[in-house]
Amino acid sequence: MPEFLDIKNLDAGYGRCQVLFGVNIAIPARGGVAVLGRNGAGKSTLMKAIVGELPTWSGKVHFDGRDIDRRRTEERVRAGIGYVPQEHAVFARLSVRENLAVGSIFRADASAVERVMAMFPKLGQRLHQPAGTLSGGERKMLAIGRAMLGNPKLLLLDEPTEGVWIGVIEELTERLSELAREIAVIIVEQHLDLAIRVAGQAYVLDRGRVALSGPSQQLREDPRLLTYLAP
């Protein structure tokens, strides 16, 4: 039986610049998977290729029983892929409520809204506040909450703790760990402790190729890991 998300021999890039080379990744329907690597290793490119923001050059992306490597981003979202990008994850001029309304276009129902409010109670206290005036951590919560309103089966998170106060990182870690027990979560994260706590499996990219893969705790003890994470 194929994995829930099965990526085989994926090549992708920008213009004439190839970034990903023959990437193979397989993840189950539940659980967290971390994608690690230094800046420029291809982590964000991989996320964009999965959600369809970046066309794949070659290879296959198989998700939930279907080939999606030629599907548009909208179709992938409707199929159950949620995506929180590293930058510009919220609409700064819109209120929290309006941002959430954007996330509810495709699949949300009342229970999904209640779930987001339970996950991040601070959002309920700031529904009428412009998203651009929120703290860095609150903006990340809003971006994750908006993605969850689509009831995703797979959630892609690109650097969810970037620009977030250390006191909020613990809360985000707990919420993401809870999500990973219910759905598939792929997290790109420089904060290694958070990535290990959320993800039971990990892939390490180096220059667009998978250099290491396996159980997260096992990789953490691998002396080669620091070589691939060092600037």
Image: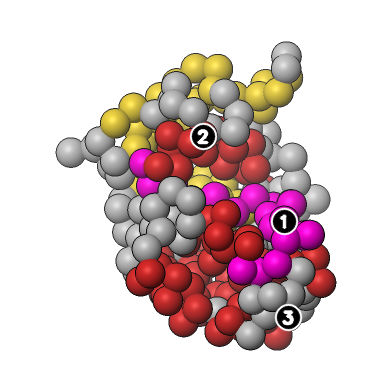
Circle 1 sits on which residue? 91
Residue 42 image-quadrant placement: top right
Question: Is the residue marked by circle 3 packed among few (<14), some (14-19), or many (20+) residues within 10 Å?
Answer: few
- State yes or no: residue 94 in magenta: yes
Residue drawn at the location 36% of the way across and 41% of the way down: 79
Could you tell whether 77 is left or right of 18 in the image? Answer: left
Nearer to us in this view, 84 or 200: 84
Question: Is the residue marked by circle 1 packed among few (<14), some (14-19), or many (20+) residues within 10 Å?
Answer: some
Q: Are marks 1 and 3 in contact (CB under 8 Å)?
A: no
Disc 3 residue type? Ile
Whole-number angstrom distance, CA of label 3 to CA of label 2: 33 Å
Q: Nearer the viewer, mark 1 or mark 3?
A: 1
User: Residue 183 location, x and y as percent?
Assistant: 35, 60
Disc 1 residue type? Phe
Tag of residue 104: none
Circle 2 sits on which residue? 73
User: Residue 209 location, x and y as percent?
Assistant: 58, 33
Mark 2 lies on a secondary structure that is helix
Q: Residue 206, can we see it?
A: no
**If you read the primary sequence from the N terminus, does the residue marked by circle 2 or circle 1 appear first?**
2
**If you read the primary sequence from the N terminus, does the residue marked by circle 1 or circle 3 appear first?**
1
Circle 3 sits on which residue? 166
Residue 20 image-quadrant placement: top right
Magenta span: chief secondary structure: loop
How many numbered badges does the structure rendering display?
A: 3
Q: Nearer the viewer, mark 3 or mark 2?
A: 2
Disc 2 residue type? Thr
